[in-house]
């Protein structure tokens, strides 16, 4: 029996690499749902290749444009309703959520409600509504399987261990495009500079988040919800080579780390095949070739967005929602060359300082906080 998979965000970096993994194991996987944004050329190619039960695109105009190019039998949807249909309306056993930003939240909740396991590459879902997602997953008996390389590493290091024995988890950070620049040197960096990530092949938004360290901040909050540890038990360490993807320290002094070449197809495949490990064509790690690994303490003054993430996580409520929403708008404005690189962190901090935090928010309250933060961030 083939495992049935739906992919939310199929044309992005994680989505395309997920489909690469599926094509490596065609005898084991079947794609039953695909959704994408506006990359219609690639999306049409994917739908024709995999012939899912349901497909969804960003809006009605794009849906009308591609409808005649899709195979017979594929149901086409669009917008938020389409995301929900692909995530929850097929017979997929696992839904891989790779859509960027908080837009993936309703579809993820819908999929969990239908009892589908979640391969989670959309960290914003847990950042904005971690309590809702984890509570519902527990109620439905659904697995939340991490796809991010750092959380996959921690997940693997915890396998078979007692959580009471965990002293601390440490998430490693490459430092992004500007890891060796001072704050003075950041004054005049360009979009092109920021998009040149030294280690990973990722989408534009996550590459900018890597440079500001927002991505690591989102990962810290995600780790809090995934592993049930306090923020005082979550550390971040700068590791330029991205070979040690993260590690766990136990109370007896033992440290268990997960290492590998920086290739997202490895954690993607593990999330899809867990608890099994299948053969992969990715490049094998040679520590002799690497020679040396380097680590540096995290500087919260150099990377204030990471400090803000820890503060928001500890405050809870709607604070992480505002942090994420303000950042999404700020990054989009930077990519459009409306603002400078350092203005991203200023926009996030201003939005947080202006926000009245609401505790234990329901979904509508989260959506309202998200809308409020986006509106403010677009005018700062």
Image (cartoon, rainbow, N blue to C red):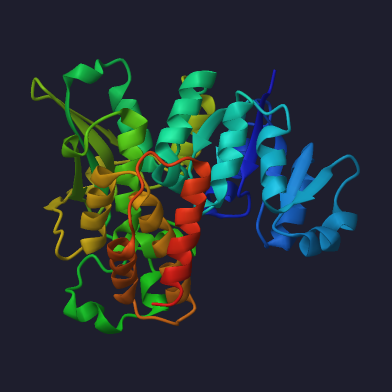
Up the image or down, 88 lies above or below 331; here it is above
Left or right of 181 in this view: 77: right
Residue at the (20%, 72%) spot, across then down: 181
Residue at the (21%, 62%) spot, across then down: 303
Left or right of 316 in this view: 304: left
Instruction: Between residue 22 and residue 80, name the one nearer to us.
Output: 80
Instruction: Between residue 356 and residue 193, name the one nearer to us.
Output: 356
Residue 28: image location, x then y, percent: 65, 25
Residue 111: image location, x then y, percent: 61, 32
Instruction: Between residue 280 and residue 7, name the one nearer to us.
Output: 7
Instruction: Between residue 202 and residue 333, name the one nearer to us.
Output: 333
Left or right of 246 in this view: 333: right
Asked which quadrant contains residue 26, the reply is top right
Up the image or down, 146 lies above or below 46; here it is above
What residue occupies the far left of the structure in this picture?
253
Residue 253: image location, x then y, percent: 8, 25
Residue 105: image location, x then y, percent: 54, 44
Where the N terminus falls, by quadrant?
A: top right
Left or right of 115 in this view: 153: left
Q: Can residue 202 be seen from the camera position used here?
A: no
How many numbered circles are shown?
A: 0
Residue at the (53%, 54%) spot, across then down: 13
Residue at the (24%, 44%) spot, across then down: 314
Up the image or down, 342 lies above or below 352; here it is below
Where the C terminus falls, by quadrant?
A: bottom left
Q: Can residue 100 be seen from the camera position used here?
A: yes
């Amino acid at each position: 029996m083939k495992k049935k998979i739906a992919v939310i965000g199929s044309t992005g970096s994680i989505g395309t690499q997920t489909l690469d993994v599926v094509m490596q194991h065609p005898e084991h996987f079947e794609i039953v749902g695909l959704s994408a944004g506006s990359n219609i050329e690639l999306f049409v190619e994917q739908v024709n290749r995999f012939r899912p039960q349901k497909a969804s695109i960003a809006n009605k105009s794009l849906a009308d444009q591609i409808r005649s190019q899709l195979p017979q039998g594929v149901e086409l949807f669009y917008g938020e309703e389409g995301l929900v249909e692909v995530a929850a309306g097929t017979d997929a056993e696992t839904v891989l959520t790779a859509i960027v930003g908080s837009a993936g939240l309703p579809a993820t909740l819908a999929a969990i409600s239908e009892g589908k396991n979640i391969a989670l590459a959309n960290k914003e879902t847990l950042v904005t509504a971690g309590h809702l997602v984890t509570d519902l997953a527990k109620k439905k008996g659904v697995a939340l399987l991490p796809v991010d390389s750092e959380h996959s590493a921690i997940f693997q290091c915890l396998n078979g261990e007692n959580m009471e024995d965990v002293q601390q988890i440490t998430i490693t950070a490459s430092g992004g495009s500007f890891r060796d620049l001072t704050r003075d040197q950041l004054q005049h960096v360009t979009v092109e500079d920021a998009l040149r990530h030294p280690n990973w092949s990722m989408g534009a938004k996550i590459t900018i988040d890597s440079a500001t360290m927002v991505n690591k901040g989102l990962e810290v909050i995600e780790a809090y919800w995934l592993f049930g540890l306090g923020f005082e038990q979550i550390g971040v360490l700068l590791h330029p080579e991205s070979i040690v993807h993260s590690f766990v320290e136990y109370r007896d002094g033992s440290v268990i780390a997960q290492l590998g070449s920086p290739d997202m197809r490895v954690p993607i495949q593990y999330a899809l095949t867990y608890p099994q490990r299948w053969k992969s064509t990715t490049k094998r790690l040679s520590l002799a070739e690497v020679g040396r690994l380097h680590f540096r303490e995290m500087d919260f003054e150099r990377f204030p967005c990471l400090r803000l993430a820890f503060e928001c996580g500890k405050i809870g409520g709607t604070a992480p929602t505002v942090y994420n929403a303000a950042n999404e708008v700020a990054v989009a404005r930077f990519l459009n060359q409306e603002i400078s690189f350092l203005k991203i962190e200023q926009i996030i901090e201003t939005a947080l300082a202006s926000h009245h935090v609401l505790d234990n928010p329901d979904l509508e309250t989260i959506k309202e906080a998200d809308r409020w933060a986006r509106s403010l961030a677009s005018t700062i």
